[in-house]
């Protein structure tokens, strides 16, 4: 495994901070929500299709080189026998955020369990089924540990969430409880 710290020369602006990997183009409708969350926060990212089963060599090569390239966080979405996030995590010490994709036969429970039940020592931070937006936000929160501007944006976003709830609560109070 090659997982050395990134060299300064490789941490330039051409390298995306986050790579959003998915097992198939059929995952894109869900996984693009991670990209939308990162777009809102001005975080650079790249989309990749890699499969733990169909392109295992390419998946290994990507994960083994990711840290040295200067990538900071990997988001990986997969459905069914969803081994992609775990396989990537096996080859890197970068944080890997797993997104279980909903499935026709088992509703995504298969994906969720495949991603979340990692063996001790090889973690994947797993979000909800189809929770790609949260994966994008979580990736930004990792980056915000060393980025004060990004941290400010995340605080603003959380304030907006709170204000929206308070507004709805006030509206219900004004209109009265429905019987
Ligand atoms: C997984 O198999 C992919 O992540 C996708 O969710 C699922 C089905 O893939 P396709 O048959 O649609 O390519 O590897």
Image (cartoon, helix red, strand yellow):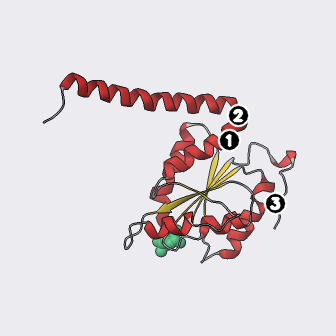
Q: How many marks?
A: 3
Q: Could you classify mark 3 by the number of other residues whose Cα lies within 10 Å: few (under 14), some (14-19), or many (20 or more)?
A: some
Label 3's element? loop
Residue 15 is situated, as x and y percent measured from the top left of the image, at 73, 48
Could you tell me which residue is drawn at 69 percent across and 48 percent down? 16
Identify the mark nearer the N-term, 3 or 2: 3
Could you tell me which residue is drawn at 31 percent across and 29 percent down? 168
Left or right, residue 115 beside residue 143: left
Residue at the disc numbered 3: 3
Residue 148 is situated, as x and y percent measured from the top left of the image, at 69, 29
Residue 47 is situated, as x and y percent measured from the top left of the image, at 60, 56
Could you tell me which residue is drawn at 58 percent across and 45 percent down? 138
Could you tell me which residue is drawn at 74 percent across and 42 percent down? 13
Residue occupying the far bottom of the picture = 54
Mark 3–mark 2 Cα distance, whole angstroms, equals: 23 Å
In the depicted structure, whether residue 147 falls above or below residue 132: above
Regarding residue 23, the answer to whether it shows in the image is: no
Q: Are marks 1 and 2 in contact (CB under 8 Å)?
A: yes
Q: Quadrant of the N terminus?
A: bottom right
Residue at the disc numbered 2: 147
Residue at the disc numbered 1: 143
Mark 3–mark 1 Cα distance, whole angstroms, equals: 19 Å
Identify the mark nearer the N-term, 3 or 1: 3
């Amino acid at each position: 495994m090659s997982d050395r710290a990134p060299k300064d020369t490789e941490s330039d602006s051409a390298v995306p901070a986050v790579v959003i990997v998915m097992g198939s183009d059929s995952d894109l409708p869900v996984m693009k929500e991670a990209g939308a969350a990162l777009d809102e926060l001005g975080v650079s990212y790249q989309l990749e299709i890699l499969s733990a089963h169909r392109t295992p060599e390419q998946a290994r090569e990507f994960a083994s080189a990711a840290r040295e390239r200067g990538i900071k966080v990997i988001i990986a979405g997969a459905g069914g026998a969803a081994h992609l996030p775990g396989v990537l995590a096996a080859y890197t010490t970068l944080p890997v955020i797993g997104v279980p994709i909903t499935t026709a036969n088992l509703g995504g429970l298969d994906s969720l369990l495949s991603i979340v039940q990692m063996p001790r020592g090889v973690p994947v931070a797993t979000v909800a089924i189809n929770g790609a937006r949260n994966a994008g936000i979580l990736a930004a929160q990792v980056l915000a540990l060393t980025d004060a501007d990004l941290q400010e944006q995340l605080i603003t976003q959380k304030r907006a969430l709170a204000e929206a709830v308070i507004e709805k609560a006030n509206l219900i109070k004004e209109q009265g409880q429905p019987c």
